[in-house]
Image (tube, grey):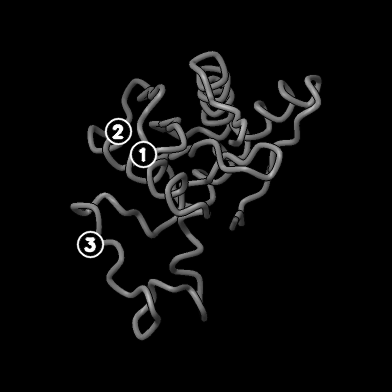
Amino acid sequence: MKTTLKLELEEARLMIDAAIRKANEIGVLETICIADDGGFPIAMDRMNGARITGPQIAWNKAFTAAGHKRSTHLFTTPPNGPALPGNEAFGIQLSFEGRFAAFVGGFPIVVDGNVVGGVGLSGGNGEQDTKCGLAALQALHELLEAKGHTVTVEADIKK
């Protein structure tokens, strides 16, 4: 039997708030989804004026990052991104009824070396989504560090 940590609404809200602060700072309208380790949303916010397609895309990115335990952009990063044409996972984005997201904006939430969820962002370009995602991870890191836990805060996460 293994004891595991589970994200709860308090942590999800903290992460979303941090991502929104960063989005406001850099001038982008984001939708942010925090998903549990099964890829299902705990919390999601769409900033006023953000695209109506954002919630589904943000959820897809959070789902993919949590479920596949890697940052979503790593699937298509040349030369060895597994979802690139000719590589072993080409076409994977068609999996899970099209929910699998193989582009920038999804990051696994890794606490003490274990994936406990995912954060997905939609609304900015890749650089903007990444900045907001890292702000969310940093906020969780700051909260949990005082409790003796480590949160991975980096763009390229692969477990």
Residue occupied by mark 1: 58
How far apart are labels 1 and 2 at the CA level? 5 Å
Q: Residue furthest left?
A: 97
Q: Position of residue 28 (x, y in %)?
A: 46, 35
Q: Residue furthest top?
A: 10
* Quadrant of the image containing the N terminus: top right
Q: Earlier in the sequence, mark 3 or mark 2?
A: 2
Q: Amino acid at mark 3?
A: Leu
Residue occupied by mark 3: 94
Q: Is residue 110 above or below residue 19?
A: below
Q: Which marked residue is nearer to the observer: mark 3 or mark 2? A: 3
What mark, if any, has residue 119 been given in the picture? none
Residue 42 placement, left or right of 152: left
Label 3 close to label 2 by CB (< 8 Å): no
Q: Is residue 32 above or below residue 62?
A: above
Residue 146 placement, left or right of 139: right
Residue at 31% across, 54% down: 100
Label 1 close to label 2 by CB (< 8 Å): yes
Residue at 44% across, 69% down: 76
Residue occupied by mark 2: 55
How far apart are labels 3 and 1 at the CA level? 17 Å
Residue at 34% across, 38% down: 59
Q: Secondary structure at mark 1?
A: helix
